[in-house]
Image (spheres, rainbow, N blue to C red):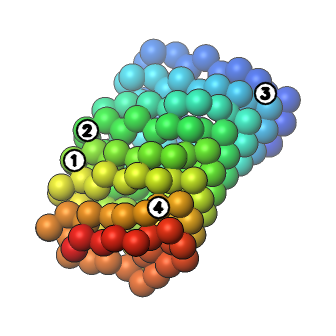
Amino acid sequence: GDYCFSLCKGLKKITFGANLESIGSYAFYECVALTSLVLPKGLTAIGNHAFYGCQNVEGSITLPAGVETLGSSAFEDCVGITQILFSDGLTTIENYAFRGCTGLTELSLPNTLETLGDDAFRFCKNITTVTFSKNLKSIGEYAFGSCEKLPQIVLPQGLITLGNFAFSQCKSLNAITL
């Protein structure tokens, strides 16, 4: 459910049941003691702000294939996450989903992804490589704003909408292919 464990600042470990299908909005909001996260394979929904501010979660996170839409701010400010393994099936990453995840260095977005929301990866200052979905239609405002170490981008040919300031303040950006 929504808010079920929000602000449980001493929560260190979560073991999800194999039958869990949905993680509600704000479910683990600012559970700052949490250090690892293994999402169940049967998961189909991750709500808004579900893991917002879980700053001590470290390492790699695998998003299960059943998740089609990732809620807004779902992993915002999870600074210890170093890798997101996206499964095919994901079509939408909502606004702010990974904003401020400074541990990320590489992104390989799934080919099923069509919509990337506003500020989705803003302030992920250590990203150096992004591989875009060939089916991506829309990149939101500030989606990669302040990704300071990103040197180049190759946008997909089918891209329809590129939001205002999408790559604003990417100080290392020296090559763009549209």
Q: Earlier in the sequence, mark 4 or mark 3?
A: 3
Q: Secondary structure at mark 4?
A: loop
Q: Earlier in the sequence, mark 1 or mark 2?
A: 2
Position of the N terminus, as image quadrant, is: top right
In this picture, is 20 found above or below 120?
above
Q: Which residue is tagged 1?
A: 111
**Horizontal arrangement in the rendering, residue 140 relative to residue 66 (left or right):** right
Using a 10 Å C-alpha cutoff, classify the residue at mark 4 as few (fewer than 14 neighbours), some (14 to 19) or many (20 or more).
many
- Give the CA distance from mark 1 to mark 3: 35 Å
Cβ–Cβ below 8 Å for labels 4 and 2?
Answer: no
Place residue 157 in its image quadrant: bottom left
Any part of residue 59 in sight: yes
Q: Determine the residue positioned at 18% across, 55% down.
A: 134
Residue 155, percent from left and from top: 25, 66
Q: Secondary structure at mark 3?
A: loop
Cβ–Cβ below 8 Å for labels 1 and 2?
Answer: yes
Q: Secondary structure at mark 2?
A: loop
